[in-house]
Image (spheres, rainbow, N blue to C red):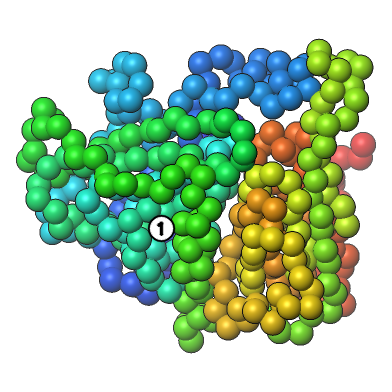
Amino acid sequence: MRATVHSAVVVLPGAGVPYPFPEPDDEAEIILGEWWHADVETVERQGSMLGMAPNMSDAHTINGKPGPLFPCYQKHTYALQVRSGKTYLIRIINAAVIDELFFSIAGHAMTVVEIDVTYNKPFVTSTVQLSPGQNMNVLVRADQSPGRYFMVAKPFNNMPIPADNKTATAILQYAGVQTSVVPILPQLMPATNSTGFVAAFHDKRRSLSSPRYPADVPLAVDRHLLYTIGLNIDPCDTCLNQSRLAASLNNITFDTNLLSVESHPFHLHGYNFFVVGRGVRNFDPAKDPAKYNLVDPPERNTVGVPAGGWAAIRFRANNPGVWFLHCHLEVHTSWDLKTAFLLEDGSGPDESVLPPPKDLPKC
């Protein structure tokens, strides 16, 4: 559905509950996505027949529109109107099917205050990076000279092969400024393969860890799990090129080790977890755990695992059921980069799956 019709669901704080940051004057949603001219089911079938990835999208989009770097942009450019001196809470969602994305607003700093619906220690940045399935709330103050400023979304991709590099644009427009005014471009954004920026950006993220919003990090671990992720080419008589890409996910951590050639955003259903560590080389069980952040690690439900590296997460298994763990790059899920956690019932009714209703139809 992220390749067709999608939207945002915003859950606000309860009545009378303030944000743990300065109250914004207004709010807006920015949904980053991808668009194919062809029917997406046809694109997927063609990829399966070839045994390879489907064709890259024809455009990236900001709130469903690609912007003036693409044809017919007059009708397909999103504009967010702001008033000088006001502060806006912008909720950014990466709903792209395949691509991790950078996002920036020309001339305007962003203060990151929330990641994956969890408050974090605020920090200021000119660019944010989101994997598919991730969301991020930022405060933006309209403190520049009244004008029109480009908002830009471009891919982050560290694969050693040519990859999608299309840029979507939208406009931050100050009230009272004519639409004929040429928008201002952002200053230099990170390079498409800027793993250094992404690593530094991840390191800035910390849970708020306040009395009202504590970081309840599990300190005692009952079980350590190690997953190794792989992408392979298997023989396939039914594929046009006689081979197909396949993924394997074997025996989380607590530690996730990645041995493929690109970053993977892993999403766990049913839980939030704490990202206590990550690195860009092989995981060292003798040295790396000593560097874990067990005080205020970021709390997430999707973690970007670096190419050739690892990510370590911790969570308390207190939600019984069968929960999907998968790469949020949709094509990788179709190649079997997925598994499930089966959590059995605990000792009481609050730790057990509710029984099916008596009138549930039988198979």
Let me know if residue 264 appears in the view.
yes
| Residue 142 sits above or below residue 41 on the image | below
| Snapshot quadrant of residue 31 | top left
Residue 269 percent coordinates (x, y): 70, 54
In the rendered view, would you say 152 is above or below 198? above
Q: Residue at x 83, y 72 (%)?
A: 224
Q: Which of the two residues, 190 or 27, is positioned nearer the viewer here?
A: 190
193 or 266, nearer to the observer: 193
The residue depicted at 57 percent of the width and 74 percent of the height is: 297
Q: Secondary structure at mark 1?
A: strand
Quarter of the image containing the N terminus? top right
- Is 192 positioned to the left or the right of 253 in the image? left
Figure quadrant of residue 180? top left
- Say which amino acid is labelled 1: Asn
Mark 1: few/some/many CA within 10 Å (<14, 14-19, 20+): many
> Residue 247: x percent and y percent?
81, 40
Q: Look at the image and tell me whether residue 356 can be seen.
A: no
Q: Residue furthest front?
A: 160
The image quadrant that residue 76 belongs to is top left
Q: Nearer the viewer, residue 27 or 234?
A: 234
146 to the left or right of 157: left
Which image quarter holds the C terminus?
top right
Q: Position of residue 278 (x, y in %)?
A: 64, 65
Q: Residue at x 57, y 30 (%)?
A: 162
Q: Residue at x 55, y 79 (%)?
A: 296
Residue 223 placement (x, y as % from top left): 85, 74
Q: Is residue 229 left or right of residue 88?
A: right
Q: Which residue is mark 1?
A: 137
